[in-house]
């Protein structure tokens, strides 16, 4: 069974631009969660989608948004990029989600904002 | 305040030796506790997941323990290998009406030397 895939793996943007990251979950998984990881803050929860609905949300500004498609693939969008948005963005999929079961992480997208 | 604290921050051990990583949490109500291994530049990989009623769970050379009364968990690595060099992250989930919250520890960075 293929693992979680994320595209692109690396991305360089400038301040003010917007970016869209993509995540394809493991087949059969309906929950997709997004995380931001930085050296200073560690892993922080962005949001979780389940069956195309946002089920939970972390404490990030509205510039961070996401969506999930009927095939469970998910996208995350960050608008008006700031230098502090430079981070590794990880997505994770699971069968049930809601913090109840094992999550499987993708390799991440390394975003650098100049 | 819901917090997850891990110790030590970093650890250096010789190949073949055992080690124990600690995780203390103040998360309430408790839903489950997970340990992840994250290699540099890659997404975290789940090692164990434990609910309130479980106090030990093993995954090969990795053994996690949970004391829900004292809100402490440990991850014991037996006969360490060079490939065990990674960050180990403790994650605690809590469920409340309308959603769930996942709190990540800052991780313990383990270096295994030959």
Image: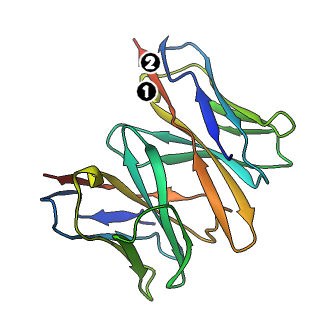
x and y percentages locating residue B34 in the rendered image:
64, 46
> Are discs 1 and 2 both within one chain?
yes
* Mark drawn on residue B112: 2
Q: In this view, does A74 lie above or below B75?
A: below
Where on the picture, by quarter, is residue A56?
A: bottom right
Q: How far apart are marks 1 and 2 (CA)?
A: 5 Å
x and y percentages locating residue A37 in the rendered image:
39, 48
Q: Is residue B79 above or below residue B63?
A: above
* Left or right of residue B111: residue A57: right
Chain letter for mark 2: B
The residue depicted at 72 percent of the width and 47 percent of the height is: B27
The residue beneath circle 1 is B85
Where on the picture, by quarter, is residue A77?
A: bottom left
SS for callout 1: loop
Disc 1 crowd, CA 10 A, few/some/many (<14, 14-19, 20+): many
Disc 2 crowd, CA 10 A, few/some/many (<14, 14-19, 20+): some
């Amino acid at each position: 069974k293929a693992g979680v895939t994320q595209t692109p793996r690396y991305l360089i943007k400038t301040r003010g631009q917007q970016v869209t990251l993509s995540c394809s979950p493991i087949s059969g998984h309906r929950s997709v969660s997004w995380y931001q990881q930085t050296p200073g803050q560690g892993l922080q929860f962005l949001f979780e989608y389940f069956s195309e609905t946002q089920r939970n949300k972390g404490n990030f500004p509205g510039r961070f948004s996401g969506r999930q498609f009927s095939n469970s693939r998910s996208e995350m969008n960050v608008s008006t990029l700031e230098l502090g948005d430079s981070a590794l963005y990880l997505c994770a999929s699971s069968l049930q989600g809601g913090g109840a079961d094992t999550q499987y992480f993708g390799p991440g997208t390394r975003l650098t904002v100049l | 305040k819901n917090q997850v604290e891990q110790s030590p921050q970093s650890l250096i051990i010789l190949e073949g030796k055992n080690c124990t990583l600690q995780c203390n949490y103040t998360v309430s109500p408790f839903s489950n506790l997970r340990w992840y291994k994250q290699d540099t530049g890659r997404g975290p990989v789940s090692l164990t997941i434990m609910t309130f009623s479980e106090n030990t769970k093993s995954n090969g050379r990795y053994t996690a323990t949970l004391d829900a009364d004292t809100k402490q968990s440990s991850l014991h690595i037996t006969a360490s290998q060079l490939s065990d060099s990674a960050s180990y992250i403790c994650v605690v989930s809590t469920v409340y009406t309308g959603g769930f919250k996942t709190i990540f520890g800052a991780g313990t960075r383990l270096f295994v030397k030959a």
